[in-house]
Image: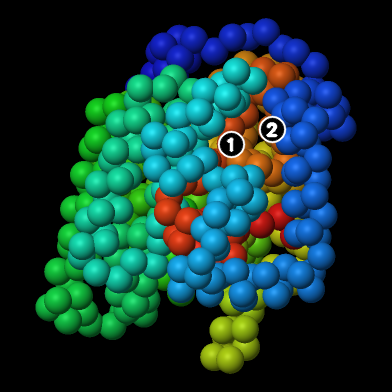
């Protein structure tokens, strides 16, 4: 592992400490929007807070996009897509990246592809991810690219690996090619000095993902954190998994990368556990999730010399906790190992006030074809990784 001082000096974080962020400061939170944009956003969120309308819209909207009904793309593009997505391709994201950086806010690029089912699609996702890394390398405000392993292999294969079932010859070939694709992605990332966040998945396919990502850390995180795993703290076992995986990285002499989220699949996880007769892996209540999430935040900040982490949350309390810990420990607010992130289009009061106080605040900017990334179906909305129930 490289000496921590050399990492700090090369990143040149500033030691100046501004006051702690005030998330109620709307002047800072919305200074990037015009009055008309604020009114438009308010109308959209008012509609989204109507549960009946959301349920109906989710069913109708998803099918309308899937079936390419007339005018659907235009309606979605000018409402939900414009609010939460950076564009349909990397070129579209340039304006968003530059606008965010004018307000000292970083960008995490996230190609909205998952649930792909054949080699052609998996190869296309790999190529797009590598292109996102190359694009990130041309923007000093884009330090990270996010990827999702279910965009690179069929979920059924991961489930068979986790359950110990023997893979067919074809499936084994797919699994080996997944490893090769991940190796290529991380090689490009390491050469460009760009980090890779690997999203978490359902509990019944997460174990092989964890192992793959930890192996990649051991290969690519020797000089700095390139590869990051994601920990869903609404699971009862993730706090201990975080600590165990960190120790494994320390023992291997590499930096540990961790993105902290609350979770994405609570209802699905509980239903499956009940149907199959095993204990639910989900915390019994919100307070238990909040407790483990905040304990995880404390752990990664206290171990910031060997852990590069991201507080990926819309929960104000958790974000303020990390900001205060950084300040109390007299760590530079913009230390490269300590990030914050919220979804583009959401929680601007958190993101921009953190940025104004000198922290590494970022927006998760999802992009891709409308049919892949609109937040209408259970399988398509990448923002569910930030669930803060």
Q: How many discs mark residues in the rendered view?
A: 2
Q: In this rendering, does residue 305 appear at all?
A: no
Answer with left or right where residue 97 lies relative to residue 212. right
Q: Which residue in the protein does label 1 denote?
A: 363
Return the residue nearer the eye: 216 or 122: 122
Q: Nearer the viewer, residue 304 or 176?
A: 176
Q: Do callouts 2 and 1 mark residues in contact (Cβ within 8 Å)?
A: yes
Quadrant of the image for the N terminus?
top left
In the drawing, what numbered circle is on residue 351?
A: 2
**Measuring 59% from the left and 45% from the top, which residue is drawn there?**
82
Could you tell me residue 171's position as x and y percent?
20, 75
Task: Tell which of 71 and 58 is nearer to you.
Answer: 71
Rendered image quadrant of residue 298: top right
Q: Quick one: quadrant of the C terminus?
A: bottom right
Using residue 100 as the reference point, say whether residue 187 is left or right of it: left
Which secondary structure, mark 2?
helix
Give the x, y percent position of residue 348: 72, 36
Please, what secondary structure does the residue beneath circle 1 have?
A: strand
Residue drawn at point x = 73 percent, y = 35 percent: 37
Disc nearer the start of the sequence (2/1): 2
Can residue 319 be seen here? The reply is yes
Q: Is residue 92 left or right of residue 299?
A: left
In the rendering, at what x and y percent does residue 47 appear?
78, 59
Mark 2 and mark 1: Cα distance apart in space: 7 Å
Residue 358 higher or lower than 91, as above or below: above
Display colour scheme: rainbow
User: Residue 326 occupies which quadrant of the picture?
Assistant: top right
- 92 up-or-down from 34: above or below: below
Position of residue 86 relative to residue 229, above or below, is above
On the image, the x and y values in percent for residue 78 come to 61, 49
């Amino acid at each position: 592992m490289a000496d921590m001082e050399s990492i700090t000096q090369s990143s040149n974080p500033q030691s100046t400490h501004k006051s702690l962020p005030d998330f109620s400061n709307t002047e800072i939170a919305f200074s990037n929007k015009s009055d008309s944009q604020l009114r438009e956003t308010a109308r959209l969120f008012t509609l989204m807070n109507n549960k009946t309308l959301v349920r109906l819209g989710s069913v109708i909207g998803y099918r309308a996009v899937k079936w390419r009904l007339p005018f659907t793309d235009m309606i979605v593009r000018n409402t939900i897509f414009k609010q939460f997505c950076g564009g349909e391709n990397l070129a579209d994201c340039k304006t968003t990246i530059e606008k965010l950086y004018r307000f000292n806010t970083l960008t995490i690029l996230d190609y909205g592809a998952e649930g792909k089912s054949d080699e052609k699609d998996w190869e296309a996702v790999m190529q797009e991810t590598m292109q996102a890394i190359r694009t990130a390398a041309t923007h000093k405000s884009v330090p990270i690219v996010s990827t999702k392993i279910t965009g690179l292999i069929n979920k059924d294969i991961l489930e068979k690996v986790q359950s110990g079932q023997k893979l067919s010859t074809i499936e084994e070939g797919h699994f080996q090619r997944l490893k090769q694709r991940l190796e290529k992605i991380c090689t490009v990332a390491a050469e460009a000095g760009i980090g890779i966040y690997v999203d978490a998945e359902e509990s019944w396919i997460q174990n092989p993902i964890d192992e793959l990502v930890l192996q990649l850390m051991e290969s690519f995180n020797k000089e700095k954190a390139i590869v990051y795993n994601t920990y869903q703290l609404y699971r009862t076992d993730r706090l201990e998994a975080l600590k165990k995986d960190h120790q494994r990285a320390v023992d291997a002499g590499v930096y540990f990368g961790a993105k902290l989220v609350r979770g994405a699949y609570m209802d699905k996880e509980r239903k499956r556990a009940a149907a199959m007769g095993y204990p639910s892996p989900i915390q019994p209540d919100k307070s238990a999730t909040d407790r483990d999430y905040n304990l995880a935040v404390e752990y990664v900040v206290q171990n910031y010399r060997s852990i590069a982490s991201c507080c990926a949350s819309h929960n104000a309390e958790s974000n303020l906790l990390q900001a205060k810990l950084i300040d109390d420990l007299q760590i530079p607010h913009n230390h490269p190992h300590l990030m914050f992130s919220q979804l583009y289009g959401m929680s601007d009061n958190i993101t921009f006030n953190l940025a104004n106080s000198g922290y590494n605040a970022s927006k998760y900017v999802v992009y891709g074809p409308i049919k892949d990334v609109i937040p209408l179906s259970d399988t398509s909305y990448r923002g569910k990784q930030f669930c803060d129930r």
